[in-house]
Image: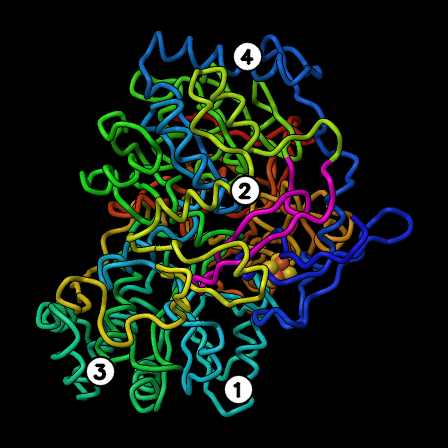
Amino acid sequence: MSAPTDTHCPYCSLQCGITLTPKPDGTLSLAGREDFPVNRGGLCIKGATATELLDHPERLTAPLVRDSRDDPFRPATWDEALDRIAAAITATQERYGRDAVGAFGGGGLTNEKAYQFGKFVRVALRSRNIDYNGRFCMSSAVAAGTRAFGMDRGLPFPFDDIPKADVLVLVGSNPADTMPPAMRFLEEGRERGARHIVIDPRRTATAELAHTHLQPVPNTDLSLANGLLHIAIRENLVDEEYIATRTNGFDAVRRAVRSYWPDRVERVTGIAVPDLYELVRALAAAPTAMILTARGVEQHADGTDTAQAWINLALALGLPGSGPGNGWGTITGQGNGQGGREHGQKADQLPGYRQLTNPAHRAHVAGVWGVDPDELPGPGVSAYELLDRMGMDAGVRALLVSASNPVVSAPNARHVEERFAALDFLAVTDIFLSETARLADVVLPTTQWAEESGTMTNPEGRVLLRRKAVDPPPGVRSDLQIWREIADRLGRGQFFPTEPEEVFTELRRASAGGIADYAGITYQRLAAGEELFWPCPAEDHPGTSHMFTERFPPPDGRANFLPVRPRLAAELPDEAHPYLLTTGRARSQYQSGTQTRRSPTLAAAVPRPYVELHPELARSLGISDGDPVRLSTPRGSAVLDARLDPGSRRDTVFVPFHWGGAACVNALTSDALDPTSRMPEFKTCPVAVEKAVFTADEQNGAAVRPAAVRT
Ligand code: SF4
């Protein structure tokens, strides 16, 4: 391939457009695409250095197997590796039943792969057990959006609407670090006079640029949103006509927020009463206003209700579906965080957002797949529950993992690592030997972003064509080929095409008539440069950039309010754990770091894992900048370098979650789950903070384990 190829970044959900051009030395140059309307040529450091992954010396290029977990890996032929996987599946299912084999996918998989992985589990394995790491990302906003609007699309409007908001409230979102090119939408808004308010316990780079930064106590957003709605009602600022004509259930919410007196909300959240009033009045008075939430709101054991509280406020002010510059939305994080949750790798879901519990949905999808609807299993359990039960009687005994590294990214990560060790069989497909792959019996090397074609869907519901730019290294196969070969060995190969466009054509039929309807989207239309947002039900349909403009999807066309109240947190600070721990991303790293920690440029930008803490907190604990700091919770501890930051709260420390081993902050995080979305409580838990004295294990680089591990 010698011509330039237009494609997209391998990392976050912004999916910036890039052009890859072959150089005479055989490598590729990379440049941002000016013609792509989302990034307009802009890239962050991650995207700009993405080619460092393609010829990386640690790249897996041959299957790896081992005869026992005590043995080192050895290279194997594809036939040996695939035969072992098929034999393990067959033996496990004969002994324990079909559901004893499960799968764990990733929010970075293309639409074609996410679709095919879900189909593979239901049709080839005939197991109910599949879920994916997107459950850890935005599932609470999905659940809240579905409850309120009858459907979930992260942004029901394009990014281009953001500059049109006269007042923009960003809650628990830090695009300046997580997706810097998206800041152009905020800059454009500020240039035309918009007012921006950031609500975040940390003074992030995004907060620095806003007009107002409100810094609440972590995990008090639900009380904050209820308190803001209380003021809006008391001040007669709600949109009564919108409420009457476009919504249901406001009276119950009106009653539920009656007791959220401003002084009470100030005591809970730490936000001063005048600031509460100012925020509500600004939102209500603005000709156009928008509320955007993200992981800071959603990654809690009450994340669904917290997202709902912000939706309640947006509905009461008449924002969703009220024209460009108005609305509520959630900014998805993972590369295919939107598309990856639409087409069947979730435990309860079939393609197009169809449901496994709905007989008509089962019949439609089974018809496309050419199987009997009764053959399809029912819903499985959510991601953490699947991991938590591995190797147990009620859990999976053999697991296939693709594009995910739960040993670093799951909460209570040491426990999860122990559950992996309890599996009878583990196969991992990845481009590098991740922390999870190191625990496997078989590791399969797979293609990566520039070596394969496929579609991705960004937070706007915009479907994008990722084009293949280079051939993969010899010996590497695509996930689509791998699943076909395993299915062949199980006698079900006839159901699994391997060409991405063929899979997409089938996905279009499977999603037709569903909520996320891709029927009218084709590779040809995308390649011709059409901007296509789902739902797009026919090839002559222009797609749907703005949703909810006339009506909401429920049968009566109305959105739903729902009263929500905070629940008591699973853990509260005590004498032993007096501070709060919150986690998130660093600008130059991404997710579990399997890719970005291996990029020399990105590794140099953040060479060591760190904990941010306020200088006064550090001083009180005898900690100086750069000192090793031990953080401990009942689940384990981690040792990180101190980074003093006056923008932190004095009661809260922040750690990026990109590292494993002794610096794995998810060894500390809580596995309390949201009752609706099954989202773990990633964002806040009580923690002990002290200057570290290394144990012998830590000196040797081993993982830090708690004295007692839950079994
Ligand atoms: Fe890639 Fe996201 Fe950075 Fe864009 S913002 S270059 S998609 S990592």
Q: Residues within 10 Å of mark 2 (few under 14, many from 20)?
A: many
Distance of mark 2 from mark 1, alpha carbons? 41 Å
- Please name the amino acid that badge 2 sits on: Pro
| Magenta highlight range | 447-472
Quadrant, the C terminus: top left
Depth order, front residue of 75/339: 339
Disc 1 marks which residue?
Answer: 190
Distance of mark 3 from mark 1, alpha carbons? 25 Å
Disc 4 marks which residue?
Answer: 84
Left or right for 326, reference 427 = left
- Please name the amino acid that badge 4 sits on: Arg
Contact, mark 3 vs mark 2 (Cβ under 8 Å)? no
Contact, mark 3 vs mark 1 (Cβ under 8 Å)? no
Q: Quick check: can you spot residue 470?
A: yes
- Please name the amino acid that badge 3 sits on: Ala
| Residue 6, placed above or below residue 608 | below
Q: Which mark is residue 500?
A: 2
Q: Which mark is residue 232?
A: 3
Q: Residues within 10 Å of mark 1 (few under 14, many from 20)?
A: many
Query: For the residues carrying marks 1 and 4, which lies nearer the camera in this image?
Result: 4
**Mark 2 or 1 closer to N-term?**
1
Distance of mark 4 from mark 2, alpha carbons? 26 Å
Q: Residues within 10 Å of mark 4 (few under 14, many from 20)?
A: some
**Mark 3 or 4 closer to N-term?**
4
Q: Name the residue rendered at 42%, 42% in the picture.
A: 506
**Mark 4 or 2 closer to N-term?**
4
**Mark 1 or 4 closer to N-term?**
4
Secondary structure of the residue carrying numbered label 2:
helix
| Residue 694, placed above or below residue 194 | above
